[in-house]
Amino acid sequence: MDTTVQRPSLVDRLNDPSTAEVLHRLLDHAESFDQMLTAAAELPNLLAIAVDFFDAVSRKASQDGIDIEQRATRLLKLLVQVTEPSNMQAIERLVSRLPKLEEGSALLDELPNLIATAMDVFDEWATQVKTEGIDLEQSMRQGLHAVLYLGGQIRRDELDRIGYLLKSEVMSENAVATVGMAGSALSSCHQGTCEHPVPKRVGLFGLLGAIRDPNTQRALSFGLQFAKCFGGVLEKNPEANLIPSNSSSNQG
């Protein structure tokens, strides 16, 4: 039994409308096919040029002490590390903060102007201090020397006592003014520059006579007022609370 399939003749196939349509499409793209064939013909030459260029780059890098293969391997490892999920998340977070980084870079651009402004202010202040007769460099040097000297001379317990003194009312404005007036009176009395000469001895009648002096009366009035105020303070703060417990233990 003959099972050979009867194929249509070539004339019949060429006369078939579908075949004619395919031929028309091929003819429409004949120019593109020709360009592709031309490019394919030039492909070996292009590959040869690329290989020659790469060889030249490799030789130049080798002369400069650069190992292309080693760097390519490290670049591949870096690519693998960058594409890790945790690193990609970090890169995404960094990219999301790029606008803030841009604002920060704008501030950095203004930093030289800010520094210049600060230097101008400092120069103006230094000039003003110099006109007042203060040597800024010498003052800073002596101040640093004083800090280092005091730091080496004062113990911790003494610093605690100084801190307690600063927190007390002894350093208040009125207390300092009173101590200043007392110091001025002591200095004047010691130098003999006050209104009354300093007697060598004072008896009972001399004391009674001195009480009639208005200045002595003012001093006695101040002393009595101080005694009252100090008594009130002692009533509010017992003597045991005047000195911190740690200072007492250190003294003991």
Image (cartoon, grey):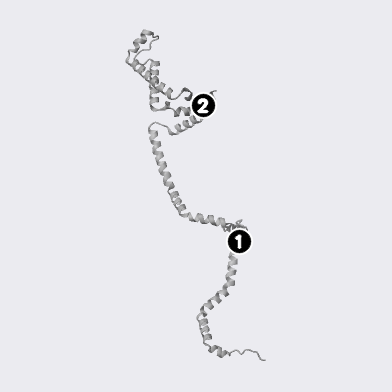
Q: Which residue is mark 2?
A: 245
Inspect the image, locate mark 2, and give the three-letter code of the amino acid beneath it: Ser
Left/right of residue 233 with respect to residue 49 in the rendered view: left
Q: Quadrant of the N terminus?
A: bottom right
Dot 1 falls on a residue whose secondary structure is: helix
Left/right of residue 85 with respect to residue 122 in the rendered view: right
Q: Which residue appears at 58% of the width and 67% of the height? A: 50
Crowd band around label 2 with a 10 angstrom C-alpha radius: few (<14), some (14–19), many (20+): few
Q: Quadrant of the C terminus?
A: top right
Q: Residue furthest right?
A: 1
Q: Nearer the viewer, residue 161 or 221?
A: 221
Q: Which residue appears at 46% of the width and 52% of the height? A: 100
Q: How many marks?
A: 2
Q: Quadrant of residue 223?
A: top left
Q: Residue furthest bottom?
A: 1
Q: Is residue 76 above or below residue 18?
A: above
Inspect the image, locate mark 1, and give the three-letter code of the amino acid beneath it: Ser
Q: Nearer the viewer, residue 131 or 99?
A: 99
Crowd band around label 1 with a 10 angstrom C-alpha radius: few (<14), some (14–19), many (20+): some
Q: Which residue appears at 35% of the width and 18% of the height? A: 221
Q: Quadrant of residue 6?
A: bottom right
Q: Nearer the viewer, residue 138 or 77?
A: 77
Q: Which residue appears at 39% of the width and 37% of the height? A: 125
Q: Residue 188: x, y in percent?
A: 38, 17
Q: Is residue 104 above or below residue 172?
A: below
Which of the two marks, 2 or 1, is nearer to us in this view? 2
Q: Which residue is mark 1?
A: 58
Q: Residue furthest front?
A: 235
Q: Quadrant of residue 212?
A: top left
- Residues at marks 2 and 1, CA–CA distance in whole angstroms: 81 Å
